């Protein structure tokens, strides 16, 4: 019987399945002198051994992408993985080993960590092993995942409500916008000042030009007075006096002509 307030016993992992995907290795120690090495990986979990295919000429960065299924044992949270270089004539060359802890994948259901390889004989680093672990019995909380869709669906309803509000506000604003429409046709915003300005200037311009133009023709009429004395000179008796003085002088000539 379970009592509230007391910690409950953790769920047993005995017999549960752990999915292990061997992705590949990086910067492996090179065991070949004249050619590229051919690496492969061995997974060991309490006597359950699995071997990947050999990546021929994989060199220092082989790729595998192979998946295996392990049957978990209660109380055993560690998997051993070792990397080897395949040889056809001689025995395979040992490259490095790593210990994979299962605490994270059992708790969360997923782990994609990279694991450092070490040469057990020399204690030196031998490269990196990349794995992806999946565990179906992890403490996943689907309730949170389900809550997210509801949270996402809620905002659309909120956005739908303001939409009609904006539409209503625009509908009220459109009529007043139609009222000022005729004003721009008559004169726009400049219509009020334009009628006031021309009314003030029109009388000023009309009064100023009228007195200004008459004096100008008077100034131009001034030249005719000198022309009038010109007409007076021909009317003077000087011109008639000249011909009579000329006629008596030649009058003597006709007398001489008569004597001839």
Image (cartoon, grey):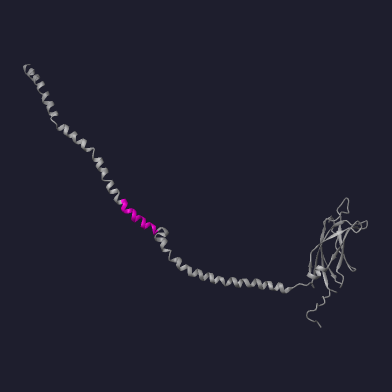
**Up-down relation of residue 103 to residue 226 (above or below):** below
Q: Residue furthest top?
A: 260
* Left or right: residue 42 compared with residue 4: right
Picture coordinates of residue 219, whole percent (x, y) = 25, 41
Q: Residue at x 25, y 43 (%)?
A: 217
Q: Residue at x 22, y 38 (%)?
A: 224
Q: Residue furthest front?
A: 5
Magenta-colored span = 191-205
Along the line of sight, the residue nearer the viewer: 29 or 138: 138
Quadrant where the image shows the C terminus: top left
Picture coordinates of residue 14, whole percent (x, y) = 85, 74
Q: Residue furthest left?
A: 259
Q: Residue at x 31, y 52 (%)?
A: 204
Image quarter for residue 55?
bottom right
| Callout count | 0
Residue 64 visible, this angle: no
* Left or right: residue 148 compared with residue 191: right
**Up-down relation of residue 97 to residue 71 (above or below):** above
Along the line of sight, the residue nearer the viewer: 141 or 201: 201
Along the line of sight, the residue nearer the viewer: 57 or 75: 75
Residue 117 visible, this angle: yes
């Amino acid at each position: 019987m379970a009592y509230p307030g007391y910690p409950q016993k953790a769920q047993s992992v005995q017999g549960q399945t752990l999915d292990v995907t061997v992705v590949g290795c990086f910067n492996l120690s090179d065991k070949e002198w004249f050619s590229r090495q051919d690496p492969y990986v061995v997974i060991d979990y309490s006597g359950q051994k699995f071997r990947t295919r050999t990546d021929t000429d994989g060199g220092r960065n082989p790729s595998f992408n192979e998946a295996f299924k392990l049957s978990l044992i209660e109380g055993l949270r560690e998997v051993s993985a070792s990397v080897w270089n395949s040889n056809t004539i001689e025995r395979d060359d040992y490259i490095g080993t790593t210990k994979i802890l299962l605490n994270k994948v059992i708790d969360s259901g997923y782990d994609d960590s990279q694991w450092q390889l070490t040469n057990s004989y020399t204690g030196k680093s031998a490269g990196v092993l990349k794995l992806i672990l999946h565990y179906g019995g992890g403490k996943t909380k689907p309730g949170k995942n389900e809550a997210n869709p509801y949270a996402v669906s809620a905002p659309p309803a909120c956005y739908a409500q303001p939409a009609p509000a904006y539409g209503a506000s625009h509908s009220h604003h459109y009529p007043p916008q139609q009222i000022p429409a005729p004003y721009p046709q008559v004169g726009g915003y400049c219509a009020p000042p334009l009628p006031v300005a021309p009314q003030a200037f029109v009388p000023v311009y009309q009064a100023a030009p009228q007195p200004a133009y008459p004096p100008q023709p008077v100034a131009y009429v001034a030249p005719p007075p000198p022309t009038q004395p010109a007409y007076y000179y021909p009317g003077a008796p000087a011109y008639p006096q000249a011909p009579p003085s000329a006629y008596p002088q030649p009058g003597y000539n006709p007398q001489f002509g008569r004597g001839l």
